[in-house]
């Protein structure tokens, strides 16, 4: 089950899902959430409070992100340097499409509006060349110039204009230019589908 908590009253609503949850992503509209499971992605309608779709996938869904087209990007975390397939789930069509391999040690994050989806790499030595070609991504930061400690995770701000790394580095992520800041410790890539 997942629980929806009202921040004003702290009341929680329980919503049953088909399997043990491993990840959750809120849609850009805020009307639904995607719930990741082992071999399954559930789409929960927040107005009705129930699962409106359950779509089978060939891997555990440990990281999820909505894009601005309403698709759910699914990533299965593994060990660094182990290629893991990025999947694109279209809830409306019920389809699952492979989009290329990523280093299994990374994290998948999206801005709240879904317009930008980011992936960070835990392993500085991974070039992830195959995924760049398959998914059409390009690196945004040069890791060789990095100086702070390892900061493999990042979190978009609510307005989507900045990214904050796990170490507190703030990156400008405006639509006018690629994210920029001195000293990001790992490669940062924007997923372009």
Image (cartoon, helix red, strand yellow):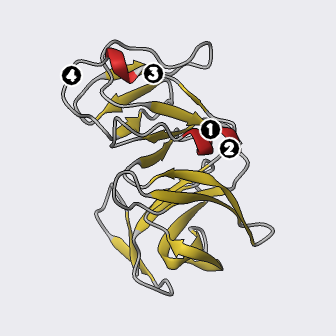
Mark 4 / mark 1, whichever is N-terminal: 1
Residue 74 in sight = no
Residue 102 in sight = yes
Which of the labelled discs sits on residue 132, or is there none? 1
| Residue of label 2 | 135
Q: Quadrant of residue 148?
A: top left
Cβ atoms under marks 4 and 1 closer than 8 Å: no
Mark 3 / mark 1, whichever is N-terminal: 1
In the image shown, does 184 or 113 lie closer to the viewer?
Answer: 184
Residue 106 x, y percent position in the rendering: 40, 48
Q: Regarding mark 1 in the picture, which secondary structure is present there?
A: helix
Q: CA distance from mark 3 to mark 1?
A: 14 Å
Q: CA distance from mark 2 to mark 4?
A: 29 Å
Disc 2 crowd, CA 10 A, few/some/many (<14, 14-19, 20+)? some
The residue furthest left is: 149
Disc 3 crowd, CA 10 A, few/some/many (<14, 14-19, 20+)? many
The residue depicted at 52 percent of the width and 41 percent of the height is: 128
| Residue of label 3 | 141
Q: CA distance from mark 3 to mark 4?
A: 14 Å
Residue 116 x, y percent position in the rendering: 59, 35
Cβ atoms under marks 2 and 4 closer than 8 Å: no
How many dots with numbers? 4
Depicted 139 relative to depicted 79: above or below: above
The residue depicted at 45 percent of the width and 21 percent of the height is: 141
User: Does residue 37 appear to the left or right of 44 in the view shown?
Assistant: left
Residue 87 x, y percent position in the rendering: 62, 60
Cβ atoms under marks 3 and 2 closer than 8 Å: no
Cβ atoms under marks 1 and 2 closer than 8 Å: yes
């Amino acid at each position: 089950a997942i629980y929806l908590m009202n921040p004003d009253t702290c009341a929680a609503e329980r919503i049953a899902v088909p399997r043990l949850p491993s990840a959750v992503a809120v849609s850009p509209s805020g009307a639904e959430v995607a719930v990741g499971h082992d071999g399954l992605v559930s789409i929960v309608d927040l107005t009705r409070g129930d699962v409106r779709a359950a779509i089978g996938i060939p891997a555990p869904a440990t990281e999820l992100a909505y894009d601005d087209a309403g698709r759910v990007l699914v990533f299965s975390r593994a060990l660094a340097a182990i290629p893991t397939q990025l999947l694109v789930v279209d809830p409306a069509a019920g389809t699952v499409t492979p989009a290329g391999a990523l280093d299994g040690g990374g994290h998948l994050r999206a801005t709240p509006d879904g317009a930008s989806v980011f992936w960070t790499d835990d392993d500085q030595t991974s070039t992830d060349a195959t995924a760049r070609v398959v998914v059409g991504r390009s690196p945004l930061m040069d890791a060789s110039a990095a100086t702070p400690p390892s900061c493999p995770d990042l979190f978009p701000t609510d307005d989507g204009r900045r990214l904050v790394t796990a170490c507190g580095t703030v990156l400008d992520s405006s639509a006018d230019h690629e994210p920029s800041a001195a000293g990001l410790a790992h490669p940062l890539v924007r997923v372009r589908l």
